Image (cartoon, grey):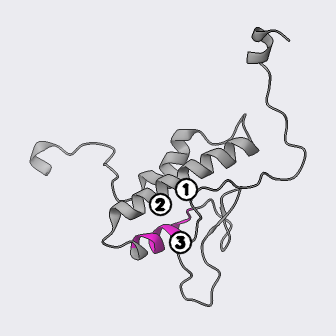
């Protein structure tokens, strides 16, 4: 096989078992609240919420993460960025052709966090 055909080979189609998650950050937050309920943690590698089945982080997980990391915005940003990286890897591996784009995943995992900027900068008089 020459170099030209090697460059344009397609990825193999997923036929076997789901991929084994990599050794990135372990999604152990948010903690269950109240303690007797199922925590809103991701089900990897699909990144769906274990409690409600919505794409993780679901609204409840976001709220609980903000409360749990209150006063520690850098810790929350680092945690979410690491999970964004892991989710990008897992979701692309599961569906490389029509899965979520990196921008969609960034907005889902990181953009809602503590350092988000408004979509439109306020005018000088509105600040």
- Which quadrant of the structure image shows residue 45? bottom right
- Which quadrant of the structure image shows residue 94? top right
Q: Compare residues 57 and 20 and report the one nearer the observer.
A: 20
Q: Position of residue 113 (x, y in %)?
A: 40, 58
Question: Pointer 3: what residue?
Answer: 29
Mark 3, residues whose alpha carbon is within 10 Å: few (<14), some, or many (≥20)? Answer: some
Mark 1, residues whose alpha carbon is within 10 Å: few (<14), some, or many (≥20)? Answer: many
Element type at marker 1? Answer: helix
Q: Position of residue 15 (x, y in %)?
A: 90, 44
Decide whether residue 72 is among the magenta residues.
no
Assign the N terminus to one quadrant of the image: top right
Q: Quote the CA–CA distance across marks 1 and 3.
A: 11 Å
Mark 2, residues whose alpha carbon is within 10 Å: few (<14), some, or many (≥20)? Answer: some
Q: Residue at x 76, y 9 (%)?
A: 4
Up the image or down, 82 lies above or below 12; here it is: below
Tell me which segment is drawn in magenta: 57-66
Element type at marker 3? Answer: loop
N-term mark: 1 or 3: 3
Q: Are marks 2 and 1 in contact (CB under 8 Å)?
A: yes
Which mark, by number, is residue 118?
none
Up the image or down, 36 lies above or below 38; here it is: below
Q: Compare residues 55 and 13 and report the one nearer the observer.
A: 13
Question: Pointer 2: what residue?
Answer: 79
Q: Are marks 3 and 2 in contact (CB under 8 Å)?
A: yes
Left or right: residue 51 versus residue 119 is right
Up the image or down, 42 lies above or below 10; here it is: below
Q: Residue at x 57, y 71 (%)?
A: 28
Magenta segment's dominant SS is: helix
Which mark, by number, is residue 83?
1
Q: Position of residue 35 (x, y in %)?
A: 57, 89
Decide whether residue 61 is among the magenta residues.
yes
Left or right: residue 122 versus residue 61 is left
């Amino acid at each position: 096989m020459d170099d030209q055909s090697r460059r344009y080979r397609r990825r193999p189609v997923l036929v076997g078992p789901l991929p084994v998650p990599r050794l990135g950050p372990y999604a152990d937050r948010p903690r269950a609240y109240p303690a007797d309920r199922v925590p809103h943690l991701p089900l990897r590698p699909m990144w769906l919420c274990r409690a409600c089945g919505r794409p993780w982080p679901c609204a409840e997980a976001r709220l609980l993460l903000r409360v749990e990391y209150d006063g520690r915005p850098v810790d929350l940003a680092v945690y979410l960025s690491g999970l964004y990286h892991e989710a990008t890897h897992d979701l692309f591996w599961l569906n490389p052709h029509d899965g979520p784009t990196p921008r969609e995943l960034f907005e889902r995992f990181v953009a809602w966090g503590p350092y988000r900027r408004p979509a439109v900068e306020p005018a000088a008089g509105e600040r």
